Image (spheres, helix red, strand yellow):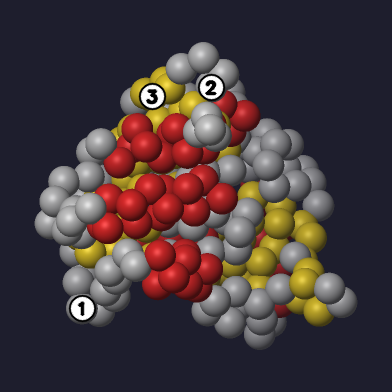
Amino acid sequence: MAMSLKAQAAAAALKEVKPGMKLGIGSGSTVNELIRLLADMVKDGFEIIGVPASSYSQALCDELGVPLTTLDETPVLDLVIDGADEIDPQLNLIKGGGAALLREKIIAAASGRMLVIADESKIVDTLGKFPLPVEVIPFGLEATRQMMQNSLDAEGLQGEMILRMAGDKPLVTDNGNYILDCHLKAISDPKSLAKRLEVIPGVVEHGLFIDMAVRAYVAGTDEIRVLEP
């Protein structure tokens, strides 16, 4: 049976993982393929210790026998492999479609290098067609939303901010927060927007991953492309 594009990208990135590494494991459907492949390597005697970015990734690792630790026990990681919702030519990313962006960014920041695995549908010229997730504290939500709107206005960005729901209630992240999805269409200066969002008190974290990824393994119909900034 032929490997899916997501599995092919995951398999290519796994070639950079060496025995004994402390590995950050992201979240999302492409990372699920990575976990399955990694579990096969562990069964064959490959030694690794992982730190997962979401409760789902943790559960899948536990189910398949991938050994895990925590950032408290292992605060410095060698490498993190994660997916992305969008990737621009500088390898800046939008992440957070699965609502794990805060943990994903903490793990990425604790890692020596970040690799991205994706299929070619995630490659864009300009970030923003995928709604930008921003994790916010529930307290003072409307005040935070207004401050975020001021930042968007200052960047010349227009678009709706929509509270992400789980059924008829706000979605609650693994860390007890809410997500505001910003439908911006195009973000002309991701770095500038990131700086503006970071100083808003009610914003816990945003889904712009700027200057973090060093390489992306992108699966297309004919080949795996390796992209660098």
Amino acid identity at mark 1: Glu
How far from the left and from the top, in percent, is residue 202? 58, 74
Q: Residue at x 70, y 63 (%)?
A: 180
Q: Is 147 on the left-hand or right-hand side of 58? A: right
Residue carrying label 3: 227
In 3D space, how far apart are the residues under numbered discs 1 and 3 (Cα atoms)?
32 Å
Q: Residue furthest right?
A: 168
Within-10-Å neighbours for mark 1: few <14, some 14–19, many 20+: few
Q: Is 213 or 16 nearer to us in this picture?
A: 16
Going from N to C along the chain, the mark reached first, 1 or 2, is: 1
Instruction: Tell me the mark number nearer the camera, choosing from 3 and 2.
Output: 2
Amino acid identity at mark 2: Gly
Kindly tell me whether residue 171 is visible in this rendering: yes
Q: Residue at x 45, y 32 (%)?
A: 8
Within-10-Å neighbours for mark 3: few <14, some 14–19, many 20+: some
Dots 1, 3 in contact, CB < 8 A: no
Which quadrant: the C terminus?
top left
Kindly tell me whether residue 88 is visible in this rendering: no
Q: Residue furthest top?
A: 222
Going from N to C along the chain, the mark reached first, 1 or 3, is: 1
Q: Residue furthest bottom?
A: 139
How far from the left and from the top, in percent, is residue 162? 79, 60
Q: Is 166 or 59 nearer to us in this picture?
A: 59
Residue carrying label 1: 73
Residue carrying label 2: 220
Q: Is 202 or 211 nearer to us in this picture?
A: 211
Amino acid identity at mark 3: Leu
How far from the left and from the top, in percent, is residue 81? 36, 48
Disc 1 element:
loop
